[in-house]
Image (tube, helix red, strand yellow):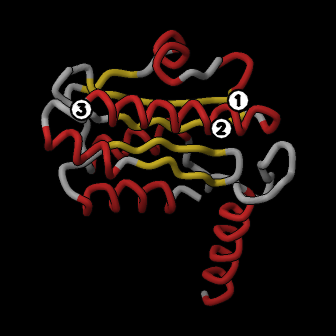
Amino acid sequence: MKKIIRLAIVLLCIGMLAGCGSKADGGTDAVQMKDGNTLQTVVDRIEDEVGIQMSADIDDQLFTDLFYIDPEADVEEYAGKMAMSMTSADNVVAVKAKPESRQKVLDGLNKRLADVQASFEQYLPDQYEKSQRGLVIEKGDYLFLLIVGETSEDQEKAQEIITEAF
């Protein structure tokens, strides 16, 4: 059991270091999802356990317009849901970037996070606070945008769900 835990820690460290390296594609093939997990199951589980207000699936057009990412050119696969209400900052997006487009996808998710933060800066303080807790998580070529939950514990639960999937 200790060996499995050590291996998991090593793999997580490799994934974190991949984002800091100077390698052109920045990704790593060492990070893989556990059997039975998909990007869609991760997003669905976050929606079920943490919640997304008035959620709707993110389609190719929304992905391009709001997340600045070309799903055909830059992504192997993705899944996502966002609130379709002007009164909620909820966004959950999971992306497996093509290795050569990893940085572009990362930049797009960070830009979306900044856009959501700016949109609630002078409007709905609770949603602004939620957006301030938002973050982009990197696991090799897998990238996640999380803006969810009413509390920091909700955000931590969403992060746990992602960690458990790998």
Of marks 3 and 1, the one in the foreground: 3
Query: Callout 1 environment at 10 Å: few (<14), some (14 to 19), or many (20+)?
Result: some
Which amino acid, by three-letter code, is at mark 2?
Answer: Lys
Where 99 sits versus 140, above or below?
above
Looking at the image, residue 161 sits to the left or right of residue 100; the answer is left
Give coordinates of residue 18: x percent, y percent: 74, 58
Labels 1 and 2: the sequence-earlier one = 1
- For the C terminus, which image quadrant? bottom right
Give coordinates of residue 127: x percent, y percent: 20, 39
Front residue of 116 and 53: 116
Q: Which residue is mark 1?
A: 76
Which amino acid, by three-letter code, is at mark 1?
Answer: Glu
Where 150 sits versus 82, above or below?
below
Mark 3 → mark 1, Cα distance in angstroms: 31 Å
Query: Callout 2 environment at 10 Å: few (<14), some (14 to 19), or many (20+)?
Result: many
Q: What secondary structure is marked by label 3?
A: loop
The tag on residue 96 is 2
Q: What secondary structure is marked by label 2?
A: strand
Give coordinates of residue 122: x percent, y percent: 18, 32
Looking at the image, residue 103 sits to the left or right of residue 92; the answer is right
Cβ–Cβ under 8 Å for marks 1 and 2: yes
Labels 3 and 2: the sequence-earlier one = 2
Q: What secondary structure is marked by label 1?
A: strand
Query: Callout 3 environment at 10 Å: few (<14), some (14 to 19), or many (20+)?
Result: many
Which amino acid, by three-letter code, is at mark 3?
Answer: Phe
Please report the residue visible at 49 percent of the width from the left and 62 percent of the height from the top.
164
Mark 1 → mark 2, Cα distance in angstroms: 6 Å
Q: Which residue is mark 3?
A: 120
Of marks 3 and 2, the one in the foreground: 3
